[in-house]
Each structure stands twice: as structure tokens, then as C-alpha cells.
Image (spheres, rainbow, N blue to C red):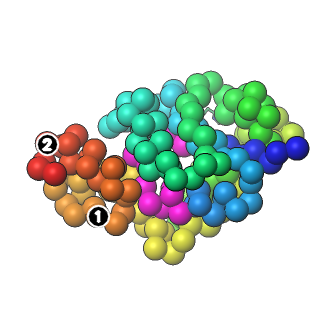
Amino acid sequence: MARIAIYPGSFDPITNGHMSLLRRALILFDQVIVAVAINSTKKPLFTVQERIELIREATAELPTVVVDSFSGLLVEYAAKKQANVLIRGMRALSDFEYEFQMALMNRRLDRTIESIFMMTDYKWFYISSTIIKEAASLNGDIHGLVPENVCRALKQKFGYAL
Ligand code: PNS
């Protein structure tokens, strides 16, 4: 049976930290579904469709990646996709409490689905979509922190020359 994992998140937008983790997860699983959450309470910069498109372009050379979106409970979406693993990246300590809470709630909701945590590469320890968006909004140099297509999309979104 194929080992399918879900890599869920807001991905607003996808960063090189996400990409690095995804590449490493692909070594462990036959297929990784990058699942963009639709009903996030956060106010996103990119629409779900834009985020999906950016991820599709950035992962075009990774044949075992599937990009999708979901609404409602993550564990229900995972079950529907016949995936029994949720992958989350762990950066600085500040991620820990939120991730712990979410993993325990997800386990309570469905004991057959396991959360696994992959430590981000040290280069991305303090990098997040939020901090990248802030820098980009002020025309800060974000090259090397996000895939090239995302870099262009951010510049366009904030009205800066490419
Ligand atoms: O990138 P993020 O914003 O940290 O991702 C959070 C996400 C989307 C994975 C989380 O909010 C989520 O799973 N949302 C779907 C609803 C759900 O199942 N929540 C967890 C149990 S209540």
C-alpha cells in the first residue's frame, strides 16, 4: 500500500523552509499531498487558488507531490485521501505549544492518524511566511527565502518592479 502523507498549512505563501521540509518528506513517503487550508481564521495575502498555483509551479519537478486544498477538519480530509500521517515542520521553540495542542486534538479526533514533526533545516529556523511578507511589503530583499515564482508574486502583490 502506498504511504501517503498530508502536509497541511496556510502556505501564504510557500517558503523555501516549506520546500526543504517537503523534499525531505518525499524521501519517506510515496506521495505527499500539500494541503492548503481554506477556512483559516487568518486573513491571507494570497487567495487559496493563488497559493495552490504558486505551490504547483514551485513543485513542478517533484512528481510525487500533489497540491490540493481542504476545508473542515484536517483528520477527515486525511481519511478521505487514505493518508494516515500528518507532517508538520518544527522551527524555533515557539512552534512547540501550538503544534502539541493541534497534534493532541487531531489524535483525539482520529486515533488512526499520526502527526509527525520534522525539524526544519537550521537555515530556516527563524523564517516564516509572515516575516517574509512583512519584508516584501517594504520592498526588502527576499531572494533565497522563497521560490523564484513566489518572489515575483510577492513583488507584484505589493506593487514593486520585478
Ligand atoms: O500553516 P498553519 O496556519 O500553521 O496551518 C494550520 C492548519 C491549517 C494545519 C490548521 O489550522 C488546521 O489543520 N486547520 C483545519 C481545521 C482542523 O482540523 N484543526 C485542527 C483540529 S481542531
Q: Residue at x 51, y 75 (%)?
A: 122
Q: Residue at x 82, y 45 (%)?
A: 2
Where 121 sits versus 114, above or below? below
Q: Residue furthest left?
A: 161
Q: Where does the magenta region start and end?
A: 7-20
Q: Is residue 15 visible?
A: yes
Q: Residue at x 48, y 61 (%)?
A: 17
Q: Is residue 97 visible?
A: no
Q: Residue at x 56, y 38 (%)?
A: 67
Q: Is residue 69 magenta?
A: no
Crowding near the residue tagged with mark 2, few <14, some 14–19, many ≥20 C-alpha atoms within 10 Å: few
Q: Residue furthest top?
A: 72
State whether label 1 is within 8 Å of ligand 1. no
Q: Position of residue 123 (x, y in %)?
A: 46, 73
11 relative position to 30: left or right: left
9 relative position to 15: left or right: right
Local secondary structure at mark 1: loop
Q: Earlier in the sequence, mark 1 or mark 2?
A: 1
Q: Position of residue 41 (x, y in %)?
A: 47, 31
Residue 70 or residue 40, whichever sits in front? 70
| Residue 153 location, quadrant | top left
Q: Is residue 11 magenta?
A: yes
Residue that label 1 marks: 143
Residue that label 2 marks: 159
Q: Quadrant of the N terminus?
A: top right
Q: Position of residue 79 (x, y in %)?
A: 78, 31
Where 139 sits versus 114, above or below? below
130 relative position to 89: left or right: left
141 relative position to 76: left or right: left
